[in-house]
Amino acid sequence: MRVVIAEDSVLLREGLARLLADGGIETVAAVSDGPALVSAVLEHEPDLAIVDVRMPPTHTDEGLRAALQVRVARPDFPILVLSQYVEERYAGDLIGRAVGYLLKERVADVAEFLETVRQVAAGGTVIDPEVVVQLLSRQRRGAPLDSLSPREREVLALMAEGRSNTAIAARLVVTEGAVEKHISGIFAKLALGPAPEDHRRVLAVLTYLGR
């Protein structure tokens, strides 16, 4: 696997590159600002970009804006946001297929982090629960969610964390069949009918996040 790192802290850039190398993942470019990220992705065509939210020159949301530019050029390109902050304005636009959003201070296990990198690169979605909580606390939840039962809300919250049906069943101590039934109920209540061009699981999570 080949990745690009976009992080303005040289120590963190080098540390991430070393960590990834130890896990058998090659860093083809390590940059410090948004424009350099876009250029590096287009030049090297990596499998994934690991992006900080706040980078020069204003240290506000350059990382996410650059990530969205990358997505315009390469739709569904895998992006893992690794930051100290939850940026509400652009995070909702980025969240979907092949994306991760982790808070730096909550990454406590190297093996789990490397597994997240691989999962996102393979097209998965992994969102830190704290990111979900902060987004929800700032965004008004739409009326369709009001129809969900407490258990359906629990299932949808775990879906937003990127968990599989098996993992959800284990967390809630129920059968996978029960989880599938709750998910079917969620789809029905959110009016997400079967459609070959849509990923209903992702659409349900986007509704949950207030898009």
Image (cartoon, grey):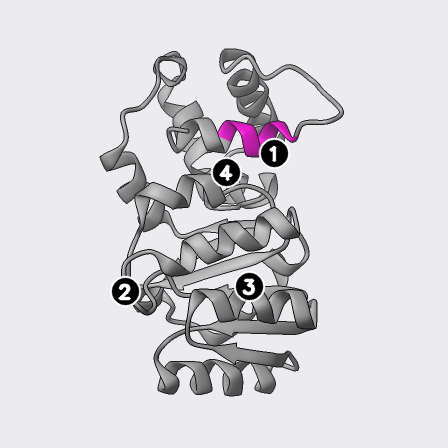
**Displayed quadrant of residue 78:** bottom right
| Image: 134 above or below 202 | below
Residues 147 and 52: in front is: 52
Quickly name the residue at label 4. 159
Residue drawn at 50 percent across, 15 percent down: 190
Give, as a three-letter code, the residue at label 4: Met
Q: Identify which amino acid the numbered label 1 is placed on.
A: Glu
Q: Disc 2 marks which residue?
A: 59
Q: Label 1: which residue?
A: 176
Q: Nearer the viewer, residue 211 or 152?
A: 211
**The residue under label 2 is which amino acid type?**
His
Whole-percent x, y for residue 210 in the image = 37, 29
Q: SS class of the residue under badge 2?
A: loop
Residue 84 image offset from top left, x and y in percent: 29, 63
Determine which quarter of the picture holds residue 195: top right
Is residue 46 visible from the viewing direction of this image?
no
Q: Judge the density around disc 2: few (<14), some (14-19), many (≥20) Cα neighbours within 10 Å.
A: few
Task: Say if 18 sits above or below 69 in the image.
Answer: below
Q: CA distance from mark 3 to mark 4?
A: 30 Å
Name the residue rendered at 59%, 85% in the picture.
21
Q: Is residue 193 magenta?
A: no
Q: Is residue 45 above or below residue 140?
A: below
Q: Earlier in the sequence, mark 1 or mark 2?
A: 2
Magenta residue span: 199-204
Please state, as top left, top right, bottom left or bottom right, where the N terminus lies in the image.
Answer: bottom right
Front tag of 4 and 2: 2
